[in-house]
Image: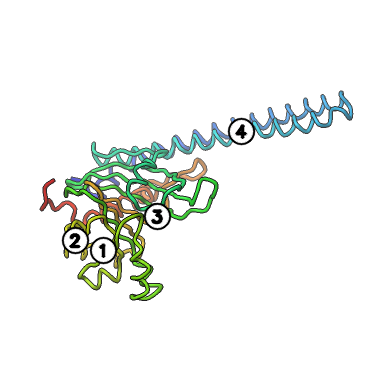
Amino acid sequence: MQKPKVEILHKVRPKLAELERQRRKMLEARQKTETTAILLVIVGLVLVLFLGSYLGDEGIPAVLVGTFLVIGVAAYFLRMGRLEAKGDLQQDIGRVITDAMGRDWNYAAKRHLSPSLVKYSGLVGKNRAIYGSNLIQGKHGDTQFSFSNINISSNENDNSDVFGGILLAIDFHKELKGKTLVFPDLAQNLLGAWLGKRVQSFGWQGLELVYLEDPTFEKAFAVYSKDQVEARYILTPNMMANMLSLKKKYGDHFSFSFTQGTIFIAIENVDPFESSLSAPILPDGTFHHFYRAIDLVTDVIDTLQLNTRIWSK
């Protein structure tokens, strides 16, 4: 079982305080490195200018190229050094917290759920650029899960995101053959029940619209599946009530995919945990900042009652 939150916080406070001392030393060392680099850039620019004056007018292009080259190389290495130090610090913070939660927990600051897994969920369209961070793998009760922050843009050449939040993959204790997707029913909300249903009837990525007997759930969500019978096998009255509870608690931020033995849940508008060399590590604040995504994920598992093993694979 997952340890109580207060117990975990008590355990990690001294370790986060030690990381704060290390952060200050790292910041001081980084500042010295950057000061040295700036001095070397100045020396390099002086040498370039001296060479330019020696060559005369013919040396002006060489001076310009040399100036941009010196500044560009220095800026690149300084930026990469900062990013690497930031990533290492973030990894240390996350490792301290997840280690305190038990041996079933792991954290990787620079990793995320694989693009192939994200696409396999069926919750995103094709030809999307996928990137992310903060991969966490753990166990809540008897339920294994993994999740990470995921950003999805419309294509590799477009910086605007069509999705930003968490993608959660949870072990589902039912044997499934097909794929069933559940989305917030925005079409009916925007277009009305009749026209919304007509729009939805075109399906989603080769899946058919599923009609259910619960009018409240039908109004809240649109369901698509390869197999109408399996969709109803998954979406029991209890499961639909639990999904409606999530909607009531968090709003229209959830989309679901039931495929094989996994539930994928996309949760929009969840900001990633980030650290910075320039920002102090305040043990309680840093812990709660990191832990809030775990709070959300474990609440989803509890609300959906996924630890209730009433089925067998």
Residue 227 is at least partly visible in this image: yes
User: Residue pushed farthest right?
Assistant: 56
Q: Badge 4: how crowded within 10 Å, few (<14), some, or many (20+)?
A: some
| Residue in the image at 59% along x and 30% along y | 33
Q: Distance between the residues labelled 2 and 3?
A: 30 Å
Q: Give how far across and how far down residue 26 sits, in percent.
A: 50, 33
Q: Nearer the viewer, mark 2 or mark 3?
A: 2
Q: Distance between the residues labelled 1 and 4?
A: 60 Å
Q: Which of marks 4 and 3 is nearer the N terminus?
A: 4
Q: Which of marks 2 and 3 is nearer the N terminus?
A: 2
Query: Which is nearer the eye, 240 or 274?
Result: 240
Q: Which of marks 1 and 3 is in front?
A: 1
Q: Which of marks 1 and 4 is in front?
A: 1
Q: Name the residue under label 4.
A: 34
| Residue in the image at 44% along x and 50% along y | 152
Residue 17 is at least partly visible in this image: no
Give above or below for 261 relative to 22: below
Query: Which is nearer the eye, 251 or 287?
Result: 251
Is mark 1 in CB contact (under 8 Å) with mark 2?
yes
Q: Name the residue under label 2.
A: 232
Q: Mark 1 points at which residue?
A: 210
Residue 66, numbered circle: none
Which kind of residue does numbered mark 3 sit on?
Val
Which kind of residue does numbered mark 2 sit on?
Arg
